[in-house]
Amino acid sequence: QLVESGGGLVQAGGSLRLSCTASHTVFRVMGWYRQAPGKRRELVAEIDRDGRTTYLASLEGRFTISRDNSKNSVYLEMNGLNSEDTAVYYCHGVPSWGGEYWGQGTQVTVSS
């Protein structure tokens, strides 16, 4: 249902753009979560179909979420990456009828 791409290895200070495309379902809210080793999964950012966004406060200004409803896709532009951003990033979708869907995750590794 949700397929991510764009993760990888990047040097500290660099940028990455994650993409997630949904199939079969139109989601009211789409977003990104991340989970670092030994830590809980946390919300990074989410966006609804009208473009309203929510960010993890500590990331606002470095990360930007966007959405293309015509492509049923959501994107995460990540700038100024540091080692604390190393995690598996998961695409997340909430359809209008409730419930939630998760992508398989994409690894982001920031080297110092």
Image: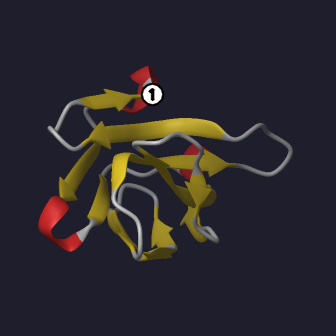
SS under mark 1: loop
Q: Is residue 112 visible?
A: no
Given the current orientation, which residue lies at the most extreme front position? 97
Amino acid, disc 1: Leu
Query: How many residues crowd around disc 1 within 10 Å: few (fewer than 14), some, or many (20 or more)?
Result: few
**Coloring scheme of the render?**
secondary structure
Please tell me which residue is depicted at 13% across the width and 68% down the height of the picture: 70
Please tell me which residue is depicted at 37% across the width and 29% down the height of the picture: 55
The answer to whether 61 is drawn above or below residue 19 in the figure is above
The answer to whether 103 is drawn above or below residue 87 in the figure is below
Please tell me which residue is depicted at 55% across the width and 46% down the height of the picture: 33
Q: Residue 28 versus residue 58: which sits nearer the camera?
A: 28
List the residue tagged with mark 1.
56
Please identify the quarter of the rendering in which residue 17 is found. bottom left
Please identify the quarter of the rendering in which residue 5 is found. bottom left
Q: Residue 14 versus residue 62: which sits nearer the camera?
A: 62
Q: Position of residue 62 (x, y in %)?
A: 30, 40
